[in-house]
Image (tube, helix red, strand yellow):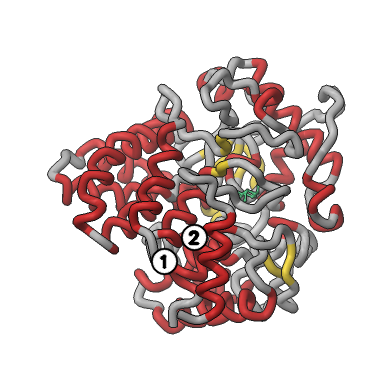
């Protein structure tokens, strides 16, 4: 085992709280949904039992509605905002009130594949929970066709320019006074700005004032946008859930129906003028007009679209390291500000899965090599500047370590 593999394992072990991992101490001291799922993929390379435990802990906090929350506040950690009191969801342990992209079925299928026997009982128990989560997505969040998000944080790509248009309609002026904690841990220049943050809090307060009632939020939330990434990730996860269901001898009709409906909605994500899949503000009926890594997940969803393929390559060729989170030629591109330009190792991993499935092995390998270089040169950071490889955000980051073990470091 090489020394970077060792370091990656040490990071996972350090961020391991027993039955779940935190993304990184300080900046993100709780369990986050998709971070945790990706951690499971990393754990599976050396401790399959621990990988299943990670997924099980996440689903233990599933709501009765089927929703799996984006943060689970297992233990008190006062240095984080917005904490459990602000979300006030009434769950035990406390959780946030929104979800995150459903990568669980995809990763669970991979973990199971790595050791069929060890996973046999665990996947059987997880299957109905994953099914219930997908059902929640399809029946609650997909009522307008493609998958929608009710808060930028639900997308997992917090301040991506995809959400600018939707955020314009949000009034952040009336939020209760609060103190941010994120800018104590990392350079404020690389984090979302204050005005944006006020709006994030305002959308959260709206959900809380609705008692986190799904229907009220879908009907009246000040923020509602369709998200290509959420749509593509859900489509992909449906496909993996079908494979799991078949292997378990479960009925697949319901999932196939969801997949067919969602696939039929994909063309409505195409912004003809932009020549790309694009997010759309459903409150004002306007496109985001932004080419982002969200749209680049079309391969991952098993969609072939030559015009979109070209968009990816153009954006990728314009930088040096990995796929940028926002089109480098756009005015809004900022190579170091969170989701407004940087390259995210785990996003590269998802895109590479899609490239490989499409038979584009050379491109998949190029993406792996560039991601490997980022981590070798910069360390296990949260994300990187795709133009010069500068490491950014939190250090000793769980999903970067996990992705190293599961993909980027495997030659
Ligand atoms: C940020 C990211 C989100 C991630 C979380 C924890 O909010 O945008 O995707 O899950 O940090 O790492």
User: Which image quadrant for residue 390?
Assistant: bottom right
**Mark on residue 354?**
1
Disc 2, disc 1: CB below 8 Å? yes
* Residue 263 seen from this side: no
Horizontally, residue 228 falls left or right of residue 380, namely left
> In percent of the image, x 31 and y 37: which residue is there?
131
Task: Count the marks.
Answer: 2
In front: 162, or 242? 242
The residue to which callout 2 is attached is: 297
In front: 22, or 389? 22
Circle 2 sits in a helix, a strand or a loop, which is it? helix
Query: Whole-percent x and y of residue 161?
Result: 71, 52
Q: Is residue 345 above or below residue 179?
A: below
* Residue 145 seen from this side: yes
In front: 324, or 59? 59
> In percent of the image, x 42 and y 24: which residue is there?
65
Query: Whole-percent x and y of residue 238?
Result: 33, 47
Where, quadrant-wise, is the C terminus in this rendering?
bottom left
> In percent of the image, x 69 and y 65: which residue is there?
342
**Mark on residue 43?**
none
Q: Tell me the distance, in whole angstroms, between the alpha carbons under discs 2 and 1.
A: 7 Å
């Amino acid at each position: 085992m090489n020394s970077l593999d060792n370091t990656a394992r040490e990071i996972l072990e350090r961020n391991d709280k027993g039955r779940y991992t935190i993304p990184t101490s300080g900046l993100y001291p709780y369990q986050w949904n998709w971070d945790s799922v990706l951690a499971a993929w990393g754990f599976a390379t050396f401790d399959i039992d621990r990988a299943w435990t990670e997924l099980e802990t996440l689903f233990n906090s599933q709501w009765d509605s089927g929703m799996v929350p984006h943060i689970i506040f297992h233990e008190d950690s006062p240095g984080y905002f917005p904490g459990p009191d602000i979300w006030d969801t009434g769950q035990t342990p406390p959780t946030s009130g929104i979800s995150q992209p459903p990568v669980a079925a995809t990763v669970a299928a991979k973990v199971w594949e790595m050791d069929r026997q060890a996973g046999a009982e665990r996947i059987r128990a997880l299957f109905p929970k994953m099914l219930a989560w997908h059902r929640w997505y399809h029946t609650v969040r997909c009522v307008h066709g493609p998958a929608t998000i009710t808060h930028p944080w639900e997308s997992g790509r917090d301040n991506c320019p995809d959400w600018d248009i939707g955020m314009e309609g949000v009034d952040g002026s009336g939020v209760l006074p609060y103190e941010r904690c994120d800018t104590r841990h990392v350079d404020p220049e690389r984090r979302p700005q204050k005005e944006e943050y006020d709006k994030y809090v305002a959308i959260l307060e709206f959900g809380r004032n609705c008692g986190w009632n799904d229907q009220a939020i879908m009907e009246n939330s000040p923020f509602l946008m369709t998200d290509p990434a959420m749509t593509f990730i859900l489509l992909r996860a449906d496909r993996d859930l079908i494979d799991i269901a078949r292997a378990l001898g479960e009925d697949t009709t319901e999932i196939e129906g969801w997949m067919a409906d969602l696939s039929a909605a994909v063309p409505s994500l195409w912004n003809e003028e932009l020549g790309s899949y694009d997010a759309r503000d459903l409150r004002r009926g306007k496109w985001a007009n932004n080419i982002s890594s969200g749209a680049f997940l079309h391969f991952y969803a098993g969609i072939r679209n030559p015009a979109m393929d070209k968009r990816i390559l153009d954006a990728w060729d314009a930088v040096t390291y990995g796929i940028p989170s926002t089109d480098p030629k756009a005015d809004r591109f900022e190579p170091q500000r969170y989701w407004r330009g940087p390259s995210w190792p785990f996003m590269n991993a998802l895109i590479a899965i899609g490239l490989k499935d499409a038979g584009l092995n050379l491109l998949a390998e190029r993406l792996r090599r560039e991601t490997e270089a980022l981590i070798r040169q910069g360390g296990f950071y949260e994300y990187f500047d795709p133009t010069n490889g500068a490491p950014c955000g939190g250090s000793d980051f769980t999903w970067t370590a996990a992705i190293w073990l599961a993909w980027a470091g495997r030659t």
